Image (cartoon, rainbow, N blue to C red):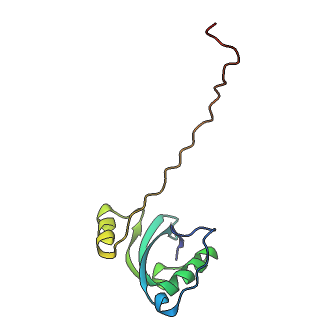
Amino acid sequence: MSDWVPRAYSKNSTPVQLDEALLEEEVVIYVTGKNVYNDPTYAYIKLKLRSVQKLKDAMDAGEKFMPSDFGTVLAAGKGEPSDEIKAEMALTYNLVDVPRPAITRSKPSMAQPSVWDEGS
């Protein structure tokens, strides 16, 4: 059992009403988490849209679960997926790899504008 976080949800996501036919459609999602040894893990899961909300609810509640509880695990492992797995997911399931934005912490500038004209 592991803790998992999808990369497509935010606390500000707007709920959407979906019809039954659409809820039976299958999608592939990428989740990351930690295993029982606290190692970072990933999984690509193929699941029905109706299971996406159940997966989100389990994650929001902090439940421990296996990705296979919600669908078919297409690939999983420790760390990050290899370039080969990413390429296979892109080719087979039309997935697009969206890199995480780099977090840069710049120091605030301490430069002060000159009060007096230093050139005179």
What residue is at 34 percent from the left and 75 percent from the top? 93
Q: Quadrant of residue 110?
A: top right
Q: Is residue 110 above or below residue 56?
A: above
Q: Is residue 83 left or right of residue 56?
A: left
Closest to the observer, 120 or 9: 120
Residue most extreme to the right: 115
Q: Is residue 99 above or below residue 108?
A: below
Q: How many marks?
A: 0
The percent position of residue 106, horizontal first and vertical second, equals 57, 39
The answer to whether any part of residue 19 appears in the image is: yes
The percent position of residue 60, horizontal first and vertical second, equals 62, 74
What residue is at 47 percent from the left and 88 percent from the top? 22
The answer to whether any part of residue 64 appears in the image is: no
Residue most extreme to the top: 120
Q: Is residue 23 above or below residue 90?
A: below
Residue most extreme to the bottom: 20
What residue is at 44 percent from the left and 83 percent from the top? 47
Q: Is residue 54 above or below residue 91?
A: below
Q: Quadrant of residue 55?
A: bottom right
Closest to the observer, 32 or 104: 104
What residue is at 45 percent from the left and 82 percent from the top? 68
The percent position of residue 6, horizontal first and vertical second, equals 51, 70
Screen quadrant of the C terminus: top right
The percent position of residue 42, horizontal first and vertical second, equals 44, 68
